[in-house]
Image (spheres, helix red, strand yellow):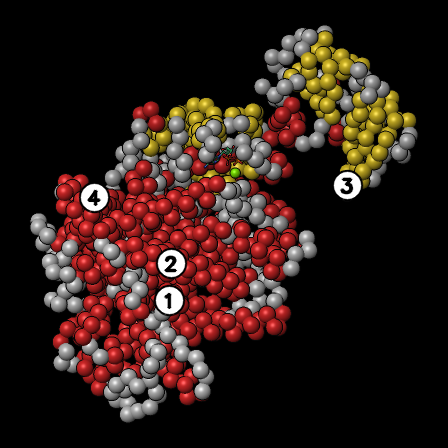
């Protein structure tokens, strides 16, 4: 069958000159489950995807959209019904050609949600384990274990058993174990969902630093959009087992492909209307914005904008501007969020820094630049 | 999908086939025998049905089993609840209670109760007489027989019910308490209904075990003139000459039909209702406060059960084994002569003891190794895994008597000619206790399954290496428990031993039966005490080892 894992490990994978090479290629992947009542679920539905060397790809989406299934299919922990998966150019899954390389020969690393540290092995033994299955000498193994444990900040715990560690420490050990094999492909399944917010933020920063230092290729699953935005070099939003949008984090956030993605990525102002002469005509008047490709004249659309792109007393160049009443203000620390009622039964949220902004009940003028408004089809396709 | 056929997977596959053949062939062969030789069996069936004692025997068997199963369910469910869900728990006692019947094998317990409560010379009756209490306990009676049955059925129910209760999410009970129910109403309206599947399967286990229980009805029922099915089947095969296999098979089919009906009822009930999923995580150690009186009553009850089930019968065995004859008094002269007899001249006694210990070690080790591999294969899923799963549980659904009879029918005669050989005994023990072995291996797999093993596969270690380096070490405790269970079951076995052993291949169960028919109570007591001590030492050593592991 395939070449042994050791030979397909990176090092040789990245061609000289630093041009990105494809490390994961997924084509037409489909995985269905049959529920106990006989209905079938397409957890991953005809999905095509490439991941280049050094990318940090984050899979984001609501619970049940197929993130875990896709990740486990890459690892060979789930068998798929159709499609192909190639890792470093090696075909590892193709039901049509009856190819299925077992998990242990895929040469991957993975960090599990439950950490999955083996309680009968010490921290050092846990971290060393992936190296013992690859042909690496004893002293080099010890060196690499020590340096990766130091890198994640738990070098002093090498001799401890996992049972004696705190949740955050266990997580660091699990991270060390998934990174010890070098600049390979590392899969993460919501690895930070079990620790408190502070530890989560620390680890997030550290994973990003290690990614820059080591240069591994990551596929990272999360349902937390803030985590996704911080970590990703590329963001992939999944919905019902299909790709809803893929691109750099800022683009997905600021230029969502449809209202589903837009809403999932964070709060927004939505005004429905009809696309008419390049502008959205709505109850509040006409709104200028940037229409996503494929929206036809006369179609029902949503003008979508983020609250932080709105102004009170907008500068002269802004043509989307209305007078209204400030209905309420919520102070949430770094920002304040104001709700403004506009004519035509439209209400919008406006964000300002700190505790600034007009008083409740005041007559105000608000506005949003045209390049901050996305014109989206009403129903996500 | 191509699966790489590693040598390891191949070996496991072969072992699986072997086990399926070993379990399936005797049963098919027996059924086939009936079909092929229909006239013989028709005649045998007619003879069995025409026998005047058939109906009374079936009736008394049903009565004894029915009443003792119900009693066992009540006692066991109560004990399990008290020790898992309330503050009345007595630490060490909760650990010992389920294994009491392993400490004192049923044959020793039955003899112990004869020594305690036979009307004339029973220790308890002598004591009552001397205290001037005008009450005579008679173990050779309906209540006596049912009582001793119950003692041996309680642990069968206690194990599954206490496991279910230990996993029960305390919030379920707390919700009932908050809604204004007292501890007893909570027990009745929430706790017991939620663990009903476990109670039912415990009752079923008790029934299956009770149908095959042979030592108690032999030793107590015979003298009480209460005919029990298991004794009759063994008699047809061992005391009649030539052995009347067809008649024994016909009676076994009756057992099979009854058990089949019980399984069907159980399956229906389980399928019918949706039961609350029991939270896997026990959230802390929140228990129901029972109060002082409740705690004291509970502990007295548990200690009382322990006395009745283990301490008193074992004490009686020890005392009588040290006496020249059974007087019913705790007076000397005491000597070790009876033990000398067991180990000395009376050739087959010592040989039986030695054979049983060797077979116990052998079968427990082979059995658990086999169970580990089979459980691993079952865990990998697929159609074959389902076949293996069902096959390894099948002996648990049948009565030991049925299986032993089927093994005789299949292997004793040509072409195998294993009748009266140790190999046949080994095969029988392996088949009989396959359900216990695979169940304990599977349940310990369940605790180390999921991401712990997946993490090893992702790290590049294959299935065999993952089993060796990750799963098996993590399962040590569970496997050890399974090993002890098998060892004690084999050493204390009497049903299969009575049917399959011979004077050339004596085992403890076989020797004890011989002594019961021709020997004296003191020698019997000595042998009973010895196997009790051997079983207890192994069980307690393993408990200690588990705690330190
Ligand atoms: N073993 C299974 N059997 C049946 N359905 C499943 C199974 N595992 C996942 N699913 C279904 O597949 C879909 C995707 O699940 P999953 O990949 O776990 O979602 P996510 O990780 O994005 O929350 C869900 O609808 C889920 O109910
Ligand atoms: Mg998931």
Mark nearer the viewer, 2 or 4: 2
- Give the chain letter at badge 4: B
Q: In this view, does B184 lie above or below B395?
A: below
Query: Left or right: A29 with respect to B102?
Result: right
Q: Is residue A194 visible?
A: yes
What is the C-alpha distance between the residues marked 1 and 3? Answer: 78 Å
Task: Look at 25% across and 64% down and name the residue there.
Answer: B494
Q: Could you confirm whether marks 2 and 3 are on the same chain?
A: no
- Considering the numbered disc 4 on the image, is that residue within a helix, a strand or a loop? helix
Q: In this view, does B129 lie above or below A84?
A: below
Q: Which of marks 4 and 1 is nearer the N terminus?
A: 4
Looking at the image, which residue sits at the far right? A362
What is the C-alpha distance between the residues marked 4 and 3? Answer: 78 Å
Image quarter in which the C terminus of chain B is found: bottom left
Q: Tell me residue A105's x, y (percent).
A: 34, 39
Q: Tell me residue B471's x, y (percent).
A: 36, 53
CB atoms at circles 4 and 1 under 8 Å apart? no
Mark nearer the viewer, 2 or 3: 2
Q: Which mark is residue B31?
A: 4
Name the residue carrying label 1: B142
What is the C-alpha distance between the residues marked 2 and 1? Answer: 9 Å
Q: Which mark is residue B63?
A: 2
- Give the chain letter at badge 1: B
Q: Could you confirm whether marks 4 and 3 are on the same chain?
A: no
Q: Could you confirm whether marks 1 and 3 are on the same chain?
A: no
Q: Earlier in the sequence, mark 2 or mark 4?
A: 4
Task: Look at 66% across and 15% down and name the residue there.
Answer: A291
- Considering the numbered disc 2 on the image, is that residue within a helix, a strand or a loop? helix
- Give the chain letter at badge 2: B
């Amino acid at each position: 069958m395939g070449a042994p894992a050791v030979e397909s490990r990176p090092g040789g994978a990245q061609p000289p000159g630093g041009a990105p090479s494809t490390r994961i290629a997924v084509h037409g992947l489909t995985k269905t489950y049959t529920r106990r009542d006989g209905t079938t679920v397409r957890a991953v539905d005809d999905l095509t995807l490439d991941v280049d060397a050094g990318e940090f790809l984050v899979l984001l989406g609501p619970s049940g959209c197929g993130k875990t299934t896709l990740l486990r299919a890459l690892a060979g922990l789930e068998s798929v019904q159709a499609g192909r998966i190639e890792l470093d150019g090696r075909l590892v899954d193709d039901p049509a050609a009856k190819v299925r390389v077992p998990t242990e020969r895929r040469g991957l690393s993975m960090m599990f949600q439950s950490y999955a540290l083996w309680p009968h092995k010490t921290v050092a033994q846990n971290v060393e384990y992936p190296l013992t299955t690859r042909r690496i000498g004893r002293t080099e193994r010890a060196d690499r274990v020590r340096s990766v444990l130091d890198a994640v900040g738990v070098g002093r715990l090498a001799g401890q058993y996992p049972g004696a560690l705190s949740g955050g420490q266990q997580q660091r050990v699990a991270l060390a174990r998934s990174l010890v094999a070098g600049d390979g492909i590392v899969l993460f399944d919501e690895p930070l969902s079990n620790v408190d917010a502070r530890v989560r933020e620390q680890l997030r920063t550290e994973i990003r630093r290690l990614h820059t230092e080591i240069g591994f290729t990551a596929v990272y699953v999360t349902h937390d959009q803030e985590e996704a935005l911080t970590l990703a070099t590329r963001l992939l939003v999944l919905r019902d087992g299909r790709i809803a949008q893929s691109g750099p984090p800022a683009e997905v956030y600021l230029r969502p492909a449809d209202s589903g993605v837009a809403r999932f990525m964070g709060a927004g102002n939505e005004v429905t209307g009809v696309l008419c002469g390049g502008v959205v005509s709505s109850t509040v008047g006409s709104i200028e914005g940037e229409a996503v490709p494929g929206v036809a004249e006369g179609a029902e659309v949503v003008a979508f904008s983020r609250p932080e792109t709105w102004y009170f007393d907008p500068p002269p160049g802004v043509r989307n501007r209305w007078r209204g009443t400030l209905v309420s203000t919520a102070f949430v620390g770094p920002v304040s969020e104001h709700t403004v009622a506009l004519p035509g039964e439209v209400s919008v949220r406006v964000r300002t820094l700190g505790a600034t902004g007009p008083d409740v009940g005041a007559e105000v003028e608000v506005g949003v630049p045209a390049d901050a408004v996305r014109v989206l089809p009403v129903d996500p396709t | 999908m191509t699966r790489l056929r590693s040598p390891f997977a191949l070996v496991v596959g072969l072992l699986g086939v072997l086990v399926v053949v070993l379990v399936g062939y005797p049963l098919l062969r027996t059924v086939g025998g009936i079909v092929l030789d229909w006239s013989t069996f028709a005649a045998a069936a007619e003879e069995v049905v025409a026998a005047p004692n058939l109906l009374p025997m079936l009736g008394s068997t049903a009565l004894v089993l029915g009443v003792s199963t119900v009693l066992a369910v009540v006692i066991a469910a109560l004990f399990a609840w008290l020790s898992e869900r309330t503050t009345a728990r007595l630490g060490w006692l909760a650990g010992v209670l389920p294994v009491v019947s392993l400490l004192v094998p049923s044959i020793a317990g039955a003899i112990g109760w004869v020594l305690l409560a036979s009307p004339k010379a029973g220790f308890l009756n002598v004591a009552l007489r001397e205290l001037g209490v005008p009450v005579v306990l008679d173990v050779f009676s309906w209540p006596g027989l049912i009582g001793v049955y119950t003692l041996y059925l309680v642990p069968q129910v206690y194990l599954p019910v206490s496991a279910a209760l230990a996993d029960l999410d305390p919030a379920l009970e707390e919700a009932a308490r908050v809604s204004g129910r007292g501890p007893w109403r909570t027990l009745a309206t929430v706790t017991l209904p939620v663990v009903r599947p476990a109670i039912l399967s415990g009752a079923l286990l008790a029934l299956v075990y009770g149908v095959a229980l042979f030592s108690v009805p032999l030793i107590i029922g015979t003298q009480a003139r209460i005919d029990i099915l298991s004794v009759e089947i063994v008699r047809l095969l061992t005391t009649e000459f030539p052995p009347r296999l067809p008649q024994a098979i016909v009676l076994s089919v009756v057992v099979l039909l009854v058990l089949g009906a019980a399984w069907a009822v159980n399956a229906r009930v389980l399928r019918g209702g949706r039961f609350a999923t029991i939270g896997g995580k026990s959230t802390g150690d929140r228990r129901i406060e029972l109060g002082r009186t409740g705690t004291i009553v509970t502990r007295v009850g548990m200690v009382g059960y322990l006395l009745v089930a283990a301490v008193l019968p074992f004490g009686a065995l020890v005392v009588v084994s040290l006496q020249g004859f059974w007087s019913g008094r705790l007076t000397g002269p005491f000597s070790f002569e009876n033990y000398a007899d067991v180990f000395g001249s009376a050739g087959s006694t010592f040989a039986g003891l030695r054979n049983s210990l060797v077979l116990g070690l052998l079968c427990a080790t082979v059995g658990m190794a086999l169970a580990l591999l089979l459980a691993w294969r079952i865990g990998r899923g697929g159609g074959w895994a389902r076949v293996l799963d069902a096959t390894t549980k099948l002996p648990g659904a049948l009565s030991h008597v049925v299986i032993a009879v089927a093994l005789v029918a299949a292997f004793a005669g040509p072409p195998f000619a294993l009748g009266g050989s140790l190999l046949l005994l080994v095969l029988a023990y392996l088949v009989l206790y396959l359900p216990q072995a695979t169940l304990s291996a599977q349940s310990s797999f369940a605790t180390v399954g999921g991401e712990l093993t997946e993490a090893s596969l992702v790290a590049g270690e294959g299935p065999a290496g993952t089993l060796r380096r990750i799963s098996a070490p993590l399962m040590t405790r569970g496997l050890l428990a399974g090993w002890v269970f098998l060892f004690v079951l084999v050493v204390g076995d009497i049903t299969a031993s009575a049917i399959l052993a011979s004077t050339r291949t004596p085992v403890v169960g076989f020797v004890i039966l011989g002594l019961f028919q021709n020997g004296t109570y003191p020698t019997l007591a000595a042998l009973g005490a010895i196997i009790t001590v051997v079983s207890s030492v192994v069980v307690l050593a393993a408990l200690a080892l588990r705690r330190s592991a």
